[in-house]
Amino acid sequence: MRGRPGLAVLLLLTLTGCVRPVVLDSEVLACREGDEGTPANGVVLLAQSVPTASWVPCLETIPLGWDVSGLEATDENARFWLDSDRDGRHAVEIRLDEHCDLTGATRIPSDREAMERWERVTQVTPQYVGTRSYVFEGGCISVLFRLSGENRAEPLGFATQGVGAVPRDAVREAVHEQTEGRLELDP
């Protein structure tokens, strides 16, 4: 595994059932990294958690003032958190599940190809709290937000633009290539 020892560690942690949250930098969840432009190692871990999901969440960009504060993956779902210097700890949580709870949500025209978009706002003051869900074949990406700052448009814009998704097939191909065929995403 030329230059990608983290992939072996992530695969090993997944196989051993390790589900403790870990602190990461944003590169571990990048949609495209390195010269090859392949999904980062953390994206592989997310994909392994929900083997039915045809799309996997990742980070396109992370604006100044935001940090990845952790990742948790189980054999049923995966999630990671983003902290904001204005909106606090775990201001945004991104989840990957096989199914979403869309109770009380409203369908909105989607900004993502091959995905339905649903919105649910549960609180407006003093915090702005809600969920944006993207439903697709075999899974759902949810962006849960709890915003305390004055400017709510910026974090919601980040949730739309900064949080991306890569096709499962791209993750599968990257694992196969990076391990020279020794490992597969979906054994």
Image (cartoon, helix red, strand yellow):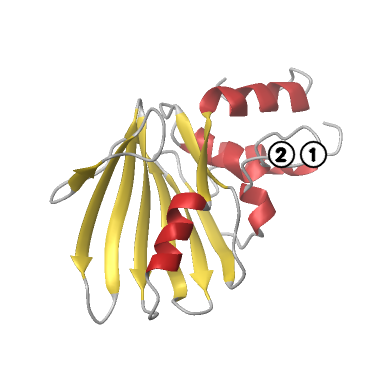
| Residue 100 vertical position relative to residue 88 in the rendered view, above or below | above
Q: Is residue 36 left or right of residue 110?
A: right
**Left or right of 159, for residue 38:** right
SS assignment at label 2: helix
Q: Secondary structure at mark 1?
A: loop
Look at the numbered discs 2 and 1 and tell me whether their residues touch, using CB distance below 8 Å: yes
- Under mark 1, the amino acid is Arg
Q: Which residue appears farthest toward the left when viewing the image? A: 104
167 in relation to 88, above or below:
above
* Residue 107 x/y as whole percent: 20, 42
In this rendering, does residue 19 appear at all?
no
Instruction: Give the position of the C terminus as an image quadrant.
Output: top right
Q: State whether residue 25 appears in this view.
A: yes
The residue at 25%/51% (across/down) is 119
Q: Residue at x 76, y 27 (%)?
A: 178
- Image location of residue 65, percent across then percent down: 59, 73
| Residue displayed at 44% across by 76% down | 87
Q: Residues within 10 Å of mark 2 (few under 14, many from 20)?
A: many
Determine crowd level at label 1: few under 14, some 14-19, many 20+ residues with C-alpha closer than 10 A: few
Identify the mark at residue 4; answer none if there is no mark.
1
Q: Identify whether 147 is placed above or below 183.
A: below
Query: Which amino acid type corresponds to the residue marked 2 in the rendered image?
Result: Leu
Does 106 sit left or right of 32 as displayed? left
Determine which residue is flagged by label 2: 7
The residue positioned farthest toward the right in the image shown: 2
As drawn, the label of residue 92 is none
The quarter of the rendered structure image containing the N terminus is top right
**Could you tell me which residue is drawn at 72 percent across and 35 percent down?**
37
Relative image position of residue 146 (x, y in whole percent): 34, 69
Q: CA distance from mark 2 to mark 1?
A: 6 Å
